[in-house]
Amino acid sequence: MEEVKDDKTCKGFADRLTLGITRVLENLPGVLDVWFVEKPPAEKRCLLSWEQKNNCALPEDLRDFYLTTDGFMLSWNTKLGNEVVPVGCMMISSVAQLRPLIQSNVYSIPNTPTLADLNFDDDLEELDGPEKPHFDSCCRIFELDPCNGNGKVCLVYKNCTSGVMVQQCEVWFLDRSLFWHYLTPSFTAYYRLMITHLGLPEWHYNFTPYGPSPQAKQWAALYQPLTFHGDSHSDTAGEPLLNKLDPVKAFCGKAKPPTPKKKQAAQVPVRGVSTAKAQGVSGRHSMTKQ
C-alpha cells in the first residue's frame, strides 16, 4: 500500500531521494503543490520473484533503488492567473508495475499485424549509435515510466536467449510513433537525467531528432533556462529550425507604382505668325547690308 504524507513530514527523506530537487522547485516562482509520494521499500522476495518470472537480472543500482522505495512519484503545479495547471511529473514504476511491454490481446488473432512487423531492416538503423531494440524474442522490454501518454521509458534487455538469464540492460525511450531513442546506459544515469529536467512535459523528446512541442519548449524555457537550448534541433544544413524574418522587409510600406508622364501635344505654328516673323528677320538682314 502506498502511503501519502504531507510534504513537511517526509522532507528529509525526499531531499535525500530527490537530491534536493524538492527545495529547488519550492523556490521557483509560480511553482506550488510540490507533492511527493513516499512509498515503503520493496521486499527482497519480490525482486527475486520478478527476476525468476522474467528471466532477467535487475541491475545493481535499480535493485538498491527498489530496496529504498518501491517506485517514485513527484509532481508539481503552477498557477496561471486564477487557474492551477499541472506541469511537472517524475515517475518510476514499482516492481509490480514493471511489466513486459507486450502486444494487446486484439493482435492475438492469426494473420494479423504484430509489433514484430514494425522492426526495420538493419541498413535503416543508425550506424554510429547503439543497436535499437526489436519487438521480438531477442529483446525483453519493460515499462519504466508511462510518460503521461507521451511515450514510454523502457528498460531494455538485448540479445536474449530462451532459458538464459540476461544481465545487461539499457534505458530507451519509445515515442508515440513507436520509434526508439537511446537515453542512458544505466538506471542511475536516467534517474539523474529525470531529476535534472524537473519532470517537465515531453522532456524525453529532447533526445529525439524532432524535439518537444512548442508548448513544452515554453515550459522548459521558463523553469529550466540554464539547461534549455532552443536551437538544439537543426536542419540538414546545420542551421537552427527557426522562422527567419527580416522586419525591414516584412513591415515596410508597399511601394507605389510611378505615375506615367503625360505626353505634351505638338504645337502647330500658325501661318500668319510665321510669315510675319520671317518678314521681320529678312528686314533686319537688309538693314545690316545697307
Image (tube, helix red, strand yellow):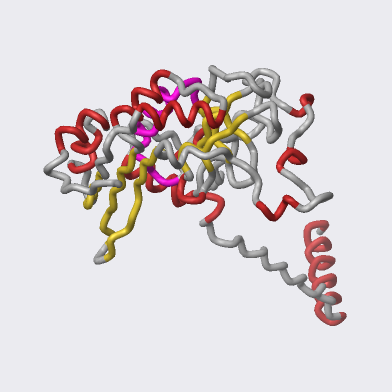
Q: Is residue 226 above or below residue 167?
A: below
Taking depth in this image into account, of 151 and 255 the one nearest to the observer is: 151
Position of the C terminus, as image quadrant, is: bottom right
Asked if residue 233 can be seen in this view, the reply is no
Left or right: 280 in relation to 10: right
Residue most toward the left?
Answer: 8
Taking depth in this image into account, of 73 and 45 the one nearest to the observer is: 45
Q: Residue at x 44, y 47 (%)?
A: 216
The picture places residue 102, in percent across and down from the top left corner, at 62, 42
Does residue 88 show up magenta in the picture? no
The picture places residue 137, in percent across and down from the top left corner, at 70, 30
Left or right: 252 in relation to 178: left
Residue 47 occupies which quadrant of the picture? top left
Residue 115 occupies which quadrant of the picture? top right
Q: Residue at x 54, y 24 (%)?
A: 56
The picture places residue 275, in percent across and down from the top left corner, at 86, 76
The picture places residue 225, in percent across and down from the top left corner, at 34, 37
Question: Which region shows up in magenta?
Answer: 184-201
Q: How many numbered callouts?
A: 0
Left or right: 243 in relation to 177: left
Q: Residue at x 51, y 28 (%)?
A: 171
Does residue 198 show up magenta in the picture? yes
Asked if residue 111 can be seen in this view, the reply is yes
